Image (tube, rainbow, N blue to C red):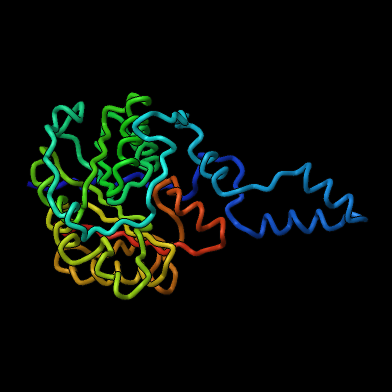
Amino acid sequence: MAHTRLKIPILSTITTTAIKFSKPSLLHGYRRHICHCSSPVSISQNQQRQPQIRSPQLVALEYADLSIPHIVCEELGATRVRQHVNPLSSSLSIPVEVPNWNDVFEDPKLPLVVDVGSGSGRFLMWLAKRNHGSKNYMGLEIRKKLVTRAEKWAKELSLSNIHFVFANATISFKELISTYPGPLMFVSILCPDPHFKKRHHKRRIVQKPLVEAITDSLMPGGQVFIQSDVLEVAVDMRNYFDAESAKVVFESDLACDNEGWLLSNPMGIRTEREIHAEFEGAKIYRRIYRKLS
């Protein structure tokens, strides 16, 4: 039976924010304008009058239409979470219980989009809100507090096509996806923890077992989107997926630089880490792979 190639809508620009300050050069120009003042006193006064734009404000602007309530609840406290988690710890080595898909999705047979390392969940919720009724979304996150809050936010937004799971994707991905009633159409791994120290490289999420689980589970024509603001990590991920050339191929029809990295974000929305990194002047390295028929 012929398979229909399903793709996430690709947008050339991000439209959620009318005005962006994603490049430091804009702020530098702003500071140069301040320096035209005639005295130290007037410089200080102007600096006090004109607040500096910070990356958290840019995140709020980018996701403004979600209208997510900033609720501090008893279960979450102030939602302080560890930035670095060891996925090799014994507590994270047990596969999660597979959910009843009829309980978590209104229609569990819709094509599924999975975000590995979903963080706060805003990125996935933004997509779910725009594709209600056509796709389901699942976020896998290794920090439990973020999953609890994301589930709370999704409920506040009345999103019936999204679900977050507290899980070690390396351990649980294959079993979760093998039980899902519909096809797996898209997987994203965006700015994963780089684990910079060489002795910690084994903790990186993109390793052969997960890559094989993803490429085996994708529907024909399904896609994988990888991204990092750390070149070493991006190259590492690229090498793992390039090694699966019998199953997936690089989407060469998208605009790329000479090194094969996408020139722009194809998703229509940036992740929070992506916003912070671009604000600091970092380059984002991206690639998309497609499952062969």
Q: With respect to residue 124, does 286 lie above or below? A: below
Which of 241/154 is in front? 154
Residue 248 picture location, percent across and down: 20, 63
* Residue 257 in the figure: left or right of residue 184: right
Asked whether residue 179 is in view, the answer is yes
Question: The C terminus appears in which quarter of the rendering?
Answer: bottom left
The image quadrant that residue 269 belongs to is top left
Answer yes or no: is residue 221 visible.
Answer: no
In the rendering, at what x and y percent does residue 96 appear?
14, 44
Relative to 124, say whether 282 is above or below. below
Spot occupied by residue 190 in the image (x, y as percentages of width and height): 35, 55
Residue at the image position 34 percent from the left and 30 percent from the top: 152
Give the residue displayed 20% in from the left and 26% down from the top. Answer: 106
| Quarter location, residue 144 | top left
| Residue at screen point 75% across, 56% down | 31
- Give whichever of 37, 75 is nearer the camera: 75
Q: Name the residue at 11% across, 40% down.
A: 98
Across the whole image, how many numbered discs are drawn on residues? 0
Q: Is residue 21 left or right of residue 79?
A: right
User: In the shown orientation, is residue 13 left or right of residue 203?
Assistant: right
Q: Position of residue 271 (x, y in %)?
A: 43, 49
